[in-house]
Amino acid sequence: MEFLRPATWREALEAQANHPGAVPIAGGTDVMVELNFGRNRPPALVDLTAVDELAEWSTVDGEIRIGATMSYTKIIAELAEELPGLAMAARTVGSPQIRNRGTAVGNLGAASPAGDSHPPLLATGATVEADSVRGSRDIRIEEFYLGVKRKALEPDELIRAIRVPAKRGPQQFSKIGTRNAMVIAVCSFGIALNTLDRTVGTGIGSAAPTPRHAGDAEEFLAGNLPWDDRDPVPDGVARRFGELVADAAVPIDDVRGPARYRTHALSVMARRTLGWAWEEYRCA
Amino acid sequence: MTAPTNLESTTSGGVGDSPQRPDGTRKVKGEFAYSSDLWHDDMLWGATLRSPHPHAGITAIDIGEALATPGVHAVLTHDDVPGVRYYGLDHPDQPVLAIDRVRYQGEPVALVAAEHPEVARRAINKIGVHYQVLEPLTDPRRAAFDASAPRLHEHGNVVRHQPVRVGDVQKARAEADVVVQGEYQIGMQDQAFLGPESGLAVPAEDGGVDLYVATQWMHVDLRQIAPCLGLPEDKVRMTLSGVGGAFGAREDLSMQVHAAMLALHTGRPIKIVYNREESFYGHVHRHPAIMRYEHGATRDGKLVYAKAETILDGGAYTSSTANVVGNAASLGVGPYEVPNVEIDAYGVYTNNPPCGAMRGFGAVQACYAYESQMDKLAAALDMHPLDVRRVNAVSEGSKLATGQLVDTPAPLAEMLRRLKNIPLPDPTDNSDIRNLPGGVSNTTHGEGVRRGVGYGVGLKNICFSEGFDDYSTARVRLEVIGGEPAALVHTAAAEVGQGLVTLQAQIARTELGIERVTIAPADTQIGDAGSSSASRQSYMTGGAVKTACEAVRASLFGRAAARFGLPEEDLSLIGGKLISARAGVLVALADFLGDEVIEEVREYHHRPTTQVDPTTGQGDSHTQLALCVHRAVVDVDVELGLLKVVELSAVQDVGKILNRTSLEGQIHGGTAQGLGLAVMEEIQLSEGKLRNPSFTDYLIPTILDMPPMRLDILENADPHAPYGLRGAGEPSTLSSTPAIAAAIRDATGLSLPRVPVRPDDLTPTS
Ligand SMILES: Cc1cc2nc3c(=O)[nH]c(=O)nc-3n(C[C@H](O)[C@H](O)[C@H](O)COP(=O)(O)OP(=O)(O)OC[C@H]3O[C@@H](n4cnc5c(N)ncnc54)[C@H](O)[C@@H]3O)c2cc1C
């Protein structure tokens, strides 16, 4: 196995193009597990951590641009204000060691339905920047996930960054696990209120073959929240929102929990996170 | 010469102190050498092919392609076992390599030795095994009672049925004002040690083999390994390597015979290291149990009878199932006085993974059932759960269900009183979500959270029971090194993380009044130490070291008495000096010893026990009994079924605190393992196959799951034990599980007959 450590983004793209089957590696917290178990034997690894700029974030046209090797630890420390939903999700990932190495872009690369970054990225309408020697393109987050561990990247493409609109209202993230830390999601939920144009974003994790929106729930809620007078969310609205979120999921039974529990938990998380987000809006 | 003053305190690091563990810093820094770190320059790597089927016949094994792989030095099957082809802890029924049938998923079928671990791993996949898949027997109740079930072993599917009969339960039923019943279940828990099965086998010039492995009991390994290799025991020399946890899982053999076979066959040292997934297949687990209990009591809470049927799933092979059944039977009603008892405990064979020793050993399962029953009884009588336990509590002078007299302190009522007096924790501080169910996963800010309180009481036998001649051996050598008196302590006892190495040195310091003590590596060049299990090593190997030190001291005093013309009874060793009660300091020990070396080897046996009667279960089967009681406070998010154990308090009687730091560690650790069983730890099976053989999905508690503990440790000495100590490694594992389950029941009002309790057991969807 070849180990390539490009020093610039251009070299990285060339390495990826010139080594068919090469696997990019950021924090390695997924890649190394796969290698250890012998599930994957790539001809080459392209280590992106020597491309310094990728570990940083910047603001571009009202969007936060998260570099491909920026760790969860850094997201929590530096982006809690701008991207509270993603920072909350990052805080639930693994252990401190995993958060020090692991990245949100790696989470996208792995494209596991259980990845914790997905719900907040979906809820906020993020964009994935895919690059190759052939050029670059933007992929809307909801078009990125194709199936279990399958994603809309060509073999020679690398993700350079994720762009996430800066906070336009309260955001929340909630995740079910059977222990209180260091746990893969049984299911998860993210919500982002856009108080400027009065829309709602959602993201469901670990309850369908891919992370997904709860479209009907978003529409229903946007139309039924008391945006003007900032009253408490009527019970019926919160309950209906929870039901619609649960309806959007197609969970399975597996070792982590039965489908019916996932559906139930999603509706509870949806109601609660809405409550917290709305409370923040009311008090703002 | 001056008269001695305050000489007691001049030897530090002795019994009662908490000296630092010699392995502590290295373990924390990652510098400690575990068995998986062993290395030999020209070694080969061994790998094991395992059965993918829980039950199948084997019609042929084709090794040609694997053997032809470059870098492969050997491919071995059952045909290549040099000696006896079966081994077993109690009963040799487990094939070294499968012969014509496999009885569990993961059963070893063939071995490969290769230049590189990767080559070995790939080569095992090139071995062609022709299986004829058979229907697996996975229902333990069926195994116990259905004669039409497939027979997994010649003698049938029941390993042991142990009844216990006292009085007349039929008659007593009529006297009961209340009767409570329940069926309880325990899932399959794993020991989940961190250091996987591993070791190194080095072929020796004399045709024998030197084995470096992480194990719990070298001599019982040796007694199984040597016959399989067709070698006399003295040609198989074992040395203990760094053990990364055990909890019972290393009591059975794993890679020992396999590595030795490959080493003898290739003439090269062989290293075998299981990875995490293989480790789940490579060791026994805790017996899952199905337990039907019925208790009858008078209106004031006095038990009049108890009836129990317990089925323990032993999986494919015998391992220690018979002894686990023995505990589940003899301790089946716990530390309560019950005048009429009818217990039937069964251990059975199935095609589930083999089960054997795990911390608590049969007593854990029983404790969960009888404690759940005590809570049911309290509820039925509208009594406080502690009161119903108190009115039935054993004490010194009580009789166990086996008829055995409790002849040492057993102050259960007092322990319950003390537990009640421990202040309850404050209400949850919701401002930090780490305090709430779900923690940083941010599932509640207080919504749906209800608090519950529960209690648990456990009774554990310490040391080996049922007539086993249980002993340990120690060699102690006293000599002057670099002008200082120094002792060397040598045993075959396994340090598995519990702190035995530290304790052995403490004992030598106290007994010999010196500070410099070295612990020799544990190996089989000395007599048996017995297993590091059954909470027995402080008692047994501690006892052996103490006895050997006493012998060294006696020999020394004999010489000193002659030289100084003083009576031996007058002499003592303190602070490196020989002291006379009358005459004060006689001489520095170093000067007195000069070039002389005093060395003694002693065996230490505990009070003999008897077998129990096969039909009535009566007998004095235990040598020592230990009690622990827990109170659990749990916050449950009743809408999501997530929970946070807020606090665990425990009262345990240990007879004598030998090392408070180690002791508290044992109580914390045992409690955490009980917490794991209560709320998360389970090997999930489907038709005999493991569904979660990894730490991604076999969850053990983290620091955010395990709460702080308040401990109240009592020291009511057992006069039969060294220093009056009572084994302390296991009791806390028993009582924490039912205490937590009870607290969850208290918070939710649900009956929760099964542990581990899962979120979906607690939510309206189930
Ligand atoms: C102990 C442990 C606990 C964990 N807990 C969690 C958890 O709680 N929640 C969770 O979501 N995940 C968890 N994970 C999984 C993992 O940590 C996350 O998926 C993490 O986000 C991966 O990031 P990484 O940088 O380490 O990715 P890597 O392992 O480096 O890469 C992951 C995938 O992305 C690809 N990739 C990396 N960079 C790029 C790029 N620039 N362009 C295209 N493809 C790329 C890789 O080829 C690979 O397929 C855990 C893992 C471990 C080992």
Image (cartoon, coloured by chain):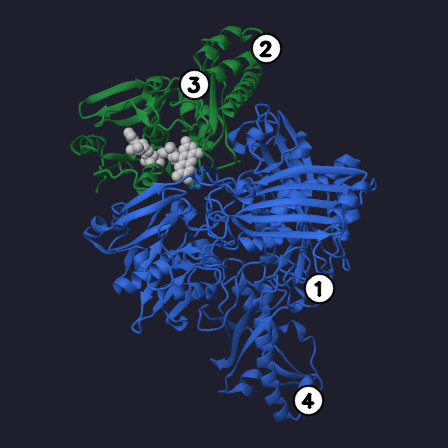
Chain colours: A green, B blue
Kindly identify which chain the residue marked by label 2 belongs to.
A
The amino acid type found where label 4 is placed reads: Pro
Vertically, is B233 above or below B107?
Answer: below
Q: Residue at x 49, y 27 (%)?
A: A258
Q: CA distance from mark 3 to mark 2?
A: 22 Å
Residue under numbered circle 1: B717
The amino acid type found where label 1 is placed reads: Ala
Horizontal and vertical percent for residue A63?
Answer: 37, 19
Q: Nearer the viewer, mark 3 or mark 2?
A: 2
Question: Observer-nearest residue: B628 or B388?
Answer: B388
Horizontal and vertical percent for residue B498?
Answer: 54, 58
Residue under numbered circle 3: A123
Q: CA distance from mark 3 to mark 1?
A: 64 Å
Lateral position of residue A154 relative to residue B674, left or right: left
For residue B91, the mark is none
Horizontal and vertical percent for residue B70?
Answer: 18, 52
Q: CA distance from mark 2 to mark 1?
A: 64 Å
Vertically, is A94 above or below B630?
Answer: above
Instruction: Tell me the SS state at disc 4.
Output: loop
